[in-house]
Image (cartoon, rainbow, N blue to C red):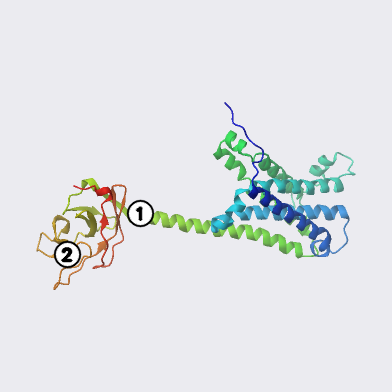
Amino acid sequence: MSVKYIPVQWNPNKYIYDAVMLLGVGLFLYIFLYAAPGILSHERPINPQVHNARAFGACAFMMLTVILCIGPLARLDPRFLPLLYNRRHFGVMTVFVAMTHAGYIVDWYFAFSSSNKYEALLFANTSYGQLAGFPFEAFGIFALFTLILLAATSHDFWMKFLSPPVWKRIHYLIYPAYLSVVAHVSLGILQDQQNHAFTVIFIGGAAAVGVLHLMAALKERRADRALAAEAAEWVPVCDVSEMKDGFAKIKLLANGERVAVYLNDGKLSAISNACAHQNGPLGEGRIIDCLVTCPWHGFQYDVTSGRSPAPFTEKIPTYNLKTEGTRVLVDARANRPGTYVEPVPVPGGVAS
């Protein structure tokens, strides 16, 4: 048996996505090369080959920045999810732009080297012990080969072949690749940049990636805490089949309080187990006409509101309930004494 993999499963959304992406790349390169060369290049004149290399390098950096912004944006606002679904196309296009940048660099700076130009790229500068003049090319080479690896393994075939966990770990390399690009640019063009327009763009892009990831992480952290709090607040009491009409199940909470959960005419209610008189065990009393009587001294309370019938004024806390299947759960957060809570119907009429 085998599975047939199609290189690209095209649909209208992908056509639009790729068309917009190509239009954006073309527009960026046009602005960089022709519309505003004085803004985005050095003040002193540079030759066309260097200018082309910088244009494609800047474009690759911006594309990679946008790619890394899409993930946190989708977590912050689901309206960005369509950008996330076809992000692989964006990544593959970024690799081609980055390879074009590398091609211009190698063909211009190392074309006339006495040794092979690729060997010269690796060994022309070995000043690794100093910051000024550090061989920033190493960061660019690492980033480029990492992006090629990610693009080559982006297809679903590799996710199936490698297994999703392994595939995911490999594609986490996008983060060290981006840091390498940042180091490559910082130690390269920015060291002798005279016009600071590109410096602002570079710093702004890198900052946007960091800030958006931080915002997304904080949002998910708050959501995780809310889910954990909700899970901790709802405490299982028993199964509905274990309850008897007119009587209670008593549950000890983590804070030391006890809750009496009653089944009354097919509906569930919960109040504090402690009588307001002398903390008598209300859960041992029986319900008659929606009122439970404390077995110690006869004080009565409405199980839906925790209030004593007029003219008495005693009040005890009530609790919210919910059911999951046939399980009964109580909210560990008590309501204020005397708060009415709508009784919860027994699911499926299961009761004894």
Q: Is residue 244 above or below residue 340?
A: above
Q: Specify the amino acid type for callout 1.
A: Ala
| Residue 252 in the image, given as x and y percentages of width and height | 24, 54
Q: In this view, does 36 lie to the left or right of 248?
A: right
Q: Which quarter of the image is occupied by the N terminus?
A: top right
Q: Residue 158's quadrant in the figure?
A: top right
The quarter holding residue 172 reads top right
Q: Where is residue 321 in the image (x, y as percent from the top left)?
A: 29, 57
Residue 28 or 105: which is nearer the viewer? 28
Q: Nearer the viewer, residue 272 or 175?
A: 272
Among numbered discs 2 and 1, the one appearing first in the sequence = 1
**Mark 1, residue position:** 232
x and y percent of residue 218 in the render?
A: 51, 59
Q: In this view, does 288 lie to the left or right of 12?
A: left
Q: Can residue 222 be seen in this view?
A: yes
Residue at 37%, 53% (x, y): give it. 231
Secondary element under disc 1, as helix, strand or loop, is: helix
Residue 154 in the image: state x and y as whole percent. Answer: 64, 41
Determine which residue is flagged by label 2: 301
Residue drawn at point x = 25 percent, y = 66 percent: 340
